[in-house]
Amino acid sequence: SAEPDTLIADGISTAAMTVTVRDANENLVPNETVTMRVTTGSGRAGAVTNNGDGTYTATYTSGTRTGRATIRAITSNEVTGETAITLIPGFAARVFVSADPDTLIADGASRTDITVTIRDAHNNLVLNETVMMRVTTGSGNVGAVTNNGDGTYTATYTSGRRAGRATIIATTSNNVSG
């Protein structure tokens, strides 16, 4: 088992892993050699400690890629067991903003889609962020922001009636802007 079973994919978050070894009669086996290793996903399992009571513990340190990490425990006679840890993105660290198309008629009605992509410090997409968009220079307005559930967020920009460049800034809940 792993506690907790969800960690931030930052390369430093840790979970305590515990393995209980039993024989065919369900008796605890206190003097077994157990190793643990990550078989899928990212991260690393530390050295295993024999607690002398049939339980064995180790520390798992998260990798920097999101997803599922599977950790396998293996006894000296090759009996195995597995647990999984879910690695989630960290806080927003980078915000990328794009418009398609990026040139509009200044008629107060022309529209374009604004797409914001948010990544954490390890380049993982941040899926559930609060994003605000606003026009900081120029004219026009930005509609409501939609979370697409894939690390991108979209809104519709409607042009103003004044020709010139409009700058749209997207800001996350932890005040990272782009």
Image: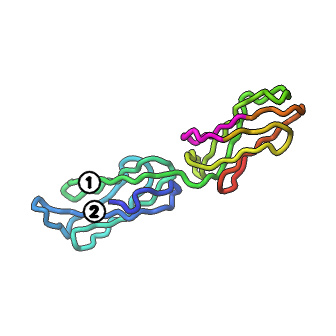
Q: Residue at x 21, y 65 (%)?
A: 32
The stretch drawn in magenta includes residue 19: no
Q: Which mark is residue 19?
A: 2
Q: Residue at x 85, y 28 (%)?
A: 106
**Tag 2, which secondary structure?**
strand
Residue 174, x across and y down, in percent: 66, 56
Dot placed on the residue nearer the N-terminal end, 1 or 2? 2
Spatial distance from mark 1 to mark 2, Cα to Cα? 8 Å
* Residue in the foreground of this view, choosing between 76 and 177: 177
Marks 1/2 in contact by CB < 8 Å: the verdict is yes
Q: Residue 81 carries which label?
A: 1
Q: Which mark is residue 153?
A: none
Residue 27, x across and y down, in percent: 13, 66
Which quarter of the figure has residue 103? Answer: top right
Please state if 50 lies on the left or on the right of 102 as rendered: left
The residue at the far bottom in this view is 52
**Tag 1, which secondary structure?**
strand
Quarter of the image where the N terminus is located: bottom left
Residue 160, x across and y down, in percent: 84, 33
Q: Which amino acid does label 1 sit on?
A: Gly
Asked if residue 2 can be seen in this view, the reply is yes
Which stretch appears magenta?
145-156
